[in-house]
Image: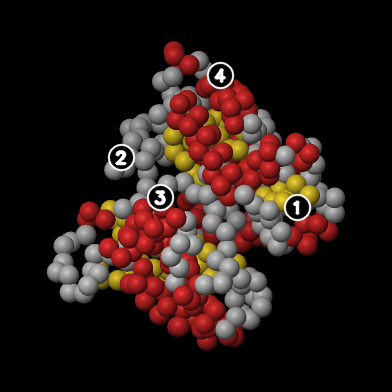
Amino acid sequence: MFVSISHPAVPRTEATILHADLDSFYASVEQRDDPTLRGRPVLVGGGVVLAASYEAKAFGVRSPMNGREALRLCPQAVVVGPRMSAYSEASKAVFDIFRDTTPLVEGISVDEAFLDVGGLRKIAGSPSDIAEKLRKRVRDEVGLPITVGIARTKFLAKVASAVGKPDGLLLVPPETELEFLHPLPVERLWGVGAVTAKKLHEHGIRTVGQIAERNESALSSILGQASSRHLYALSWARDPRHVQVGKRRRSIGSQRAIGRRPRPPAELDAIVVGIVERLGKRLRAAHRVTRTIVLRLRFDDFTRATRSRTVFEPTARNDLILQVARGLLDDALPLIAERGCTLIGLSLSNLDDDNAIQLALPFDADSNGSLDCTIDSLRDRFGSAAVTKAVLIGRDQGMTVPMLPD
């Protein structure tokens, strides 16, 4: 059972929120485990760069970059295959240190989290002292570099860790927040991606301070009301969110990059089957159910599209989820044939706890999903390939990346 814990909505006056972020996580694990890689440019992944060491980033390599392009920029780079089990183990060890530091930990991904250390001054020292001890423990006990940003708000703490990288510690005192924030490029703001940044640049807005100089109505004409309100508040360091423990995901998803080669409908269907198998197992392991299934597509020109359908009754059954997903895929096939497809993904939203399902008569032989649960148990005990759908035999299902609990 998950219980969400957070502070009352009272604005804090001290910089007591930490954002701890492991540096180039996958690449750092590889350098830790293979001493010959230390100090050298390392790329994790072949066709697509999953992670690049800072030695490789110095040449302009970024993730997720095409592997050939990365090697063109950094021909001396060492390419290593991903080891997801090693990354998962390292993540768990680091999160154990987080939770040993403070009970208020909000995981963002397997390599980053927010920590609230307010109230620990008398027993553990200042936030800077706590952050330094945390960094030392992660280095000594797990062998990985980690950067910590400290600020009064979650947003500023995350920005501080990004600016403080690699292997650094950066405190933003409350009295210097705007001095720190306003010179930064607009891309530092949450919610500013390539499209939003381009719109802002076209209107001569390149720094956070230039957003703060505009009023919300002026920004609304560029970005719309909701985005302008959000970015304007962040530009003045306004972020009322607190660190929440046990906050559950609002959706879970998985996707598969499939390259530019045209794929017949049967192959696309098999990819969807594999994704549903993974998502269904995650859903049941988290004791949750879904009502909305979303199909996500990326086309050859890098544009994207989504299709969704909401079912009448929440479910965690693979067959019901697959039935909806296949219907969405069938509807999208003409568009895929016209524009090509380089990525297929599914996400499950409108999640609820499985104990919230209204009881219904078992009109069919497996109305409660007992077959799915039995297969989950077999795979947990004997491996994911112990029981496989016939359509997936001999097909590459891609890698499974480590994730936080759902």
Question: Do labels 4 and 3 touch, CB within 8 Å?
Answer: no
Give residue 338's quadrant in the image. Answer: bottom right
Q: Position of residue 144 (x, y in %)?
A: 64, 34
Disc 3, SS:
loop
Q: Name the residue beneath numbered marker 3.
A: 406
Query: Callout 1, which amino acid?
Result: Val
Q: Position of residue 376 (x, y in %)?
A: 38, 58
Q: From the viewer's perspective, is 17 left or right of 316?
A: right
Residue shown at 80% from the left, 41% from the top: 40
Q: Name the residue beneath numbered marker 1.
A: 79
C-alpha separation, residue under disc 4 versus residue under disc 1: 37 Å
Q: From the viewer's perspective, is 281 left or right of 23?
A: left
Disc 4, SS:
helix
Residue shown at 35% from the left, 35% from the top: 6
- Which quadrant is the N terminus positioned in? top left
C-alpha separation, residue under disc 2 versus residue under disc 3: 13 Å
Question: Do labels 2 and 4 touch, CB within 8 Å?
Answer: no
In this view, 379 is above or below 161? below
Q: Nearer the viewer, mark 4 or mark 3?
A: 3
